[in-house]
Image: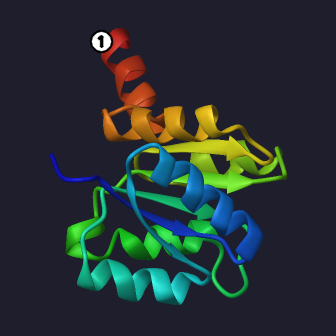
Amino acid sequence: MPHRRVLVVDDEPRILDIVKYFLEQGGYEVEGLTTGEKALAAARKTPFEVAVLDIVLVGDSGYEVASKLKRIKSAENMPVLFMSSKVEMADLFLENYDGRAEFLLKPFKKETLLESVRNLLEGGGREAHRAAARAKKK
């Protein structure tokens, strides 16, 4: 079975290396980049199954990158794991992002990162929870 491809964007090289290492240890094929611009270029060339985006980036924020990824045909339905050390960012970004997403608070454990990515790949995430809640109300 081929490795599942993950796009990771963080402008802090140390954090980027840690996230890449954890995901590779989990069996994922990872492309790690330091800017949203590079991430968008990579997504136009190669399909990814999930994106892991730091919210606070130099240039476009992770939220802006995620919104731009949705305009790329191969990435329009790609789930996103947003990361930040600012817990107050979680609800702001998850409530306003139109798609499957989760939030990961930095610092995090390897198991937490892998569980979040796995959940998104299996169809979970914030939008999935909202859709289930809407279905229950009917």
Which residue is found at the position 59% from the left and 41% from the top? 113
Camera-nearest residue between 132 and 13? 13
Residue matched to label 1: 138
Quarter of the image with the N terminus is top left
- Name the image quarter holding residue 104: top right
Q: What residue type is labelled 1?
A: Lys
**In the depicted view, which residue is nearer to us: 76 or 37?**
37
Disc 1 element: loop
- The x and y percentages for residue 6 are 40, 60
Residue 71 placed where, x, y %? 32, 75
Q: Is residue 35 left or right of residue 57?
A: left
At 29% from the left and 52% from the top, the residue drawn is 4
Pick out the residue farthest to the left. 1
Q: Which residue is drawn at 68% across and 88% down?
A: 59
Quadrant of residue 14 within the rendered picture: bottom right
Tell me: 138 left or right of 50. left
* Residue 64 vertical position relative to residue 24 in the rendered view, above or below: below
Return the residue nearer the eye: 70 or 84: 84
Residue 127: quadrant of the picture: top left
Q: Which residue is drawn at 80% across and 46% down?
A: 107
Q: Nearer the viewer, residue 85 or 112?
A: 112
Residue at the extreme front: 25
Quadrant housing the C terminus? top left
